[in-house]
Image (cartoon, coloured by chain):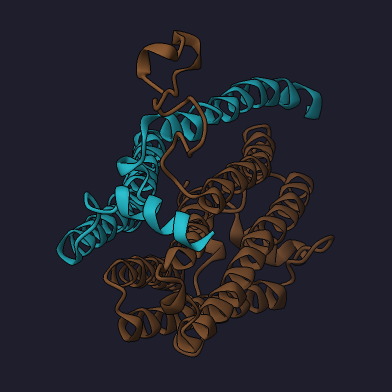
Chain colours: A cyan, B brown
Amino acid sequence: MSAESHEIHHDGEHEGMTKKKIWQIALVLSIITAIEFIIALLIVPGHPDYLRYANPAYIFLTLLKAFFIVAYFMHLKFEKMGLVLSIIVPILFIVGLILVLTNESHHWIDLRR
Amino acid sequence: MSTAAVSQIDEVKTTPWSGGRSPFNVEYGKIMMWFFLLSDAFTFSSLLISYGALRFSAAVWPAADKVFQSVPFLKESGAPLVFVGIMTFILILSSVTMVMAVEAGHRNAKKEVFWWMVATIVGGFMFLGCQALEWSHLHHEGFWWGSTPGKDELKLLFNGGTEAVQHLTAQEFANLFFTITGFHGFHVFTGVIINIIITVNVLKGTYENRGSYLMVEKVGLYWHFVDLVWVFVFTFFYLV
């Protein structure tokens, strides 16, 4: 295993993460988290109506963080397109489950009454 | 034998998908780690989506900034979301130290890999410690699988709703919170154990002799996934 894996390993290694890049991504993740806290602790408490906009904002920021972690920390951005697709495309099933169950939960509201 | 004698069908193809090597240009174990993480993503998604569905169908839900108010040893209440913020930063930082270990592995720098791995393990233990404090705090408030605080205490954790509804959704909240953060905490715990094993191997020189620190990359994938899941758990339990 070792000899072969070593070769494979070296092929895709060159376009990777440098120390500088790693700290940049870490800074981006920290800033996004800080923005989430600013929304949750400073903006929303005074204005309950803003909750409507806050929740989509949280979800957007979360997905943004997920992108940075998967693309850079997990190195997926630098892998072959075939691998990227075989990881990303099945995630569509999760989207399907979200759609089905959020729809279903609206009926549960009526059941609970 | 001249090349003319080889018929077209017998020619050896060297395109990525004609066999003999990984079309993804990734070592077998790493692909398997990716597919395991994909299946794990389905498990966590199912749990989180069930949580979402139950919460959507509830009239009221315990307000996160009222339930999570304490910073252990410093403040009993009045500091909403501060402690979970600390936990989130700890996990992000331990993810950073993990990529640093992987980066050092590419340079075959044994000592650096070792110390970055140690930092990652320390981060993992710190997170687990925080998680334990968070659990014990909620447990002392009266939340647990199958139990909630009394109705007078519950009133303080909600923005409206009748007593019966508050009791019902508080129970759902408690069950889901302990199940999902518990499952995540179990992943963190496993990750720390695996990281320790890998660190011992680094120290023993296993990967130096092998000529590649690919194992560090593979456990790194798992560790980042644990961080990734926390990003979602954090959003859906503490922010939304």
Q: Nearer the viewer, residue B198 or B94?
A: B198
Is residue B3 shown left or right of residue B202? Answer: left
Task: Work out whether residue B158 can be spotted.
Answer: yes
Extreme front residue here? B1
Is residue B180 shown left or right of residue B168? Answer: left
Report the residue at 71% width, 74% height from top.
B139
Task: Work out whether residue B227 can be spotted.
Answer: no
User: Which quadrant of the figure has residue B47?
Assistant: top right
Extreme left residue here? A20
Task: Indicate the position of residue A107 as horizontal and vertical percent values.
Answer: 72, 20
Report the residue at 45% width, 68% height from top.
B216
Where is B214 relative to B7, above or below? below
User: Which quadrant of the figure has residue B11?
Assistant: top left
Task: Indicate the position of residue B60 as horizontal and vertical percent values.
Answer: 63, 42
Q: Please state, as top left, top right, bottom left or bottom right, where the N terminus of chain B lies in the image.
A: top left
Q: Nearer the viewer, residue B8 or B79?
A: B8
Q: Nearer the viewer, residue B127 or B177?
A: B127
Report the residue at 44% width, 15% height from top.
B6
Is residue B151 shown left or right of residue B190? Answer: right
Task: Indicate the position of residue A54 as horizontal and vertical percent values.
Answer: 36, 40
Is residue B32 shown left or right of residue B7? Answer: right
Q: Number of labelled discs?
A: 0
Q: Nearer the viewer, residue B76 or B227?
A: B227
Task: Indicate the position of residue B173 as horizontal and vertical percent values.
Answer: 69, 53
